[in-house]
Image (tube, grey):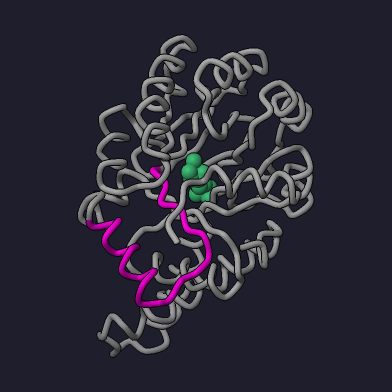
């Protein structure tokens, strides 16, 4: 069923695992992620960036596709439709109005007080409607869709500011930027685990780890042990599916039916997502 992230993440903290947010890019991603969740008996968060929503048709199309697939595939595990890196109050309201069960308001590029005011405004509307909210502080480096943050602008979250933001906004979960990066890592990721622990203690809410692609299992496990209950993955599914499309088309240059290269790509996404669910410990937690 469609649910918000709230209970999912509280359960995850208690059970010491993380729920994956897997970003959808098109129909095949949506199919693959839902099937993976059902087969793994895992709760799942479908991440929808504004760019992906636009590509697919709009917020309403996204919701209609997900609702229909839940019916047609007989999906019984908990599913949240989550706006990823919402850029404004208006976008969040539009997504909620279309049927999203969760939103992220990314005010991380604003000064603290402005970020808090914006996030609070979104929380006030969302919580009235049972929709969960995620906020970000500090700046996550790298690139996701149109969101590009240069190395020089990437910034670690300051624990005292995190405490203030969470206390004043009452968000359901919180993403402190602590060295993770959108897209592939240049070398090994260097996550700020000491701060993660401090932020968890000060805020008391489930933490979110963005840039889940390319983080070694030991770091994933350490993050989960320090209160990370949601891990976002996009690039890894994109890369694995693109590799499959390349392989199929190279092997069969005469092939033109999209189902014959997108079908195998969809299988690859499903396997990638299932692997992550096992790694995050969310399998059999639905
Ligand atoms: O918000 C989405 C993510 O943080 C995805 O990051 O593309 O590096 O896996 P990734
Ligand atoms: Zn992100």
* The image quarter in which residue 137 lies: top right
* The image quarter in which residue 61 lies: bottom left
Residue occupying the point 57% across, 59% down: 43
Residue occupying the point 71% across, 37% down: 190
- Image coordinates of residue 265 in percent, x first then y, are 43, 75
- Image coordinates of residue 5 in percent, x first then y, are 51, 46
Does the magenta-highlighted stretch encompass residue 69? yes
Q: Nearer the viewer, residue 119 or 136?
A: 119
76 versus 20 height, above or below: below
Q: In the rendered structure, which segment of residues is drawn in magenta?
A: 61-83
219 versus 272 height, above or below: above
Report whether 11 appears left or right of 97.
Answer: right
Residue occupying the point 57% across, 75% down: 39
Report whether 156 appears left or right of 15.
Answer: left
- Residue 202 is at least partly visible in this image: yes
Total of numbered circles in the picture?
0
Does the magenta-highlighted stretch encompass residue 126? no
Residue occupying the point 30% across, 46% down: 51
Q: Nearer the viewer, residue 91 or 171?
A: 171
Q: Nearer the viewer, residue 97 or 58?
A: 97
The C terminus is located in which quarter? Answer: bottom right
- Image coordinates of residue 149 in percent, x first then y, are 45, 30
């Amino acid at each position: 069923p469609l649910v918000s992230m709230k209970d999912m993440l509280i359960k995850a903290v208690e059970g010491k695992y993380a729920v994956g947010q897997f970003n959808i890019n098109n129909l095949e991603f949506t199919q693959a992620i839902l099937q993976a969740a059902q087969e793994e008996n895992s709760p799942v968060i479908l991440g929808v960036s504004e760019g992906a929503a636009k590509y697919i048709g709009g917020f309403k199309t996204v919701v209609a596709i997900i609702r229909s697939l839940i019916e047609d595939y007989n999906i019984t595990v908990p599913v949240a439709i989550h706006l990823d890196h919402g850029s404004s109050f208006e976008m969040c309201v539009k997504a909620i109005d279309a049927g999203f069960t969760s939103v992220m308001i990314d005010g991380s590029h604003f000064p603290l007080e402005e970020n808090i005011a914006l996030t609070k405004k979104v929380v006030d509307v969302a919580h009235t409607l049972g929709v969960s909210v995620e906020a970000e502080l500090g700046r996550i480096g790298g690139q996701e869709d149109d969101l590009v943050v240069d190395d020089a602008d990437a910034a670690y979250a300051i624990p005292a500011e995190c405490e203030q933001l969470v206390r004043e906004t009452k968000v359901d979960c919180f993403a402190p930027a602590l060295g993770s990066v959108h897209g592939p890592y240049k070398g090994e990721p260097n996550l700020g685990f000491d701060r993660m622990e401090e932020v968890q203690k000060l805020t008391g809410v489930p933490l979110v780890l963005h840039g889940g692609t390319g983080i070694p299992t030991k770091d994933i496990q350490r993050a989960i042990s320090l209160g990370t209950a949601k891990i976002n993955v996009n690039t890894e599914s994109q890369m694995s599916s693109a590799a499959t499309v390349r392989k199929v088309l190279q092997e069969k240059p005469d092939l033109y039916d999209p189902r014959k290269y997108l079908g195998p790509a969809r299988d690859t996404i499903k396997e990638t997502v299932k692997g992550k669910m096992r790694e995050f410990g969310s399998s059999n937690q639905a």
